[in-house]
Image (cartoon, grey):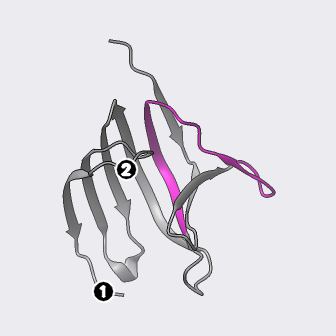
Amino acid sequence: MHRTWVTLVGAKVTVKRKLDGSMHCWLKSSDEQPCGCCRVINTKFLQSEISWLDERSKTKLAVVGEIDFAIMNKAQRHQINILLKLPKKYGDELRVSMDLNAIFFKPHPLMALFLVEGKKCKAG
C-alpha cells in the first residue's frame, strides 16, 4: 500500500476558532500572508510553533508553545499524536493521542479514544 507523508520542520501553525465554532488551521508562509494547510494523507510537524486565536474570546493571538505532532488518515479513521512543550508557567509537557473514527463532512456519529498525559502541569 502506498502512503503519502509530508513532514514540516519549524513550521508556524495557527489554529483559529471562528464565531460559529468551526476550526481552521493554516501555516504562516511569510510575515504578510498565511497559506492554507494542504490536505494530505499523513502529515508530521516537528519542532514547530503553534498559536491559538479564538474569535469567541477577547484574548489576542496566543503562542501556545513548541509542538511535534503527526496526523495519520486512512478512510474515516484518523490518528493524531501530539507532544506539546508547555511554557514554564504551565509545566513541562503535554502528550495527547487521539484515535477518531468519523466522516467529518457528513452528519455521522463520532467515535473517539483520547489519551492525555501531562508532565509537571500547573493551572494557569
Query: Marks 1/2: CA distance?
Result: 36 Å
- Which quarter of the figure has residue 73? top left
Using the image, tell me which numbered label, if any, was put on residue 107: 2
Quadrant for the N terminus, please: top left
Q: Nearer the viewer, residue 113 or 4?
A: 113
Q: Given the image, on which type of amino acid does mark 2 rest?
A: Pro
Between discs 1 and 2, the one toward the N terminus:
2
The reply, left or right, for residue 23 in relation to residue 85 is: right
Where residue 16 sits in the image (x, y, percent)? 56, 65
Where residue 75 sits in the image (x, y, percent)? 34, 30
Bounds of the magenta segment? 29-52
Few, some or many residues within 10 Å of mark 1 (<14, 14–19, 20+): few
Q: Is residue 124 above or below residue 14?
A: below
For image coordinates 38% across by 41% down, the residue present is 71
For image coordinates 60% across by 87% down, the residue present is 58
The residue indicated by pointer 1 is 123
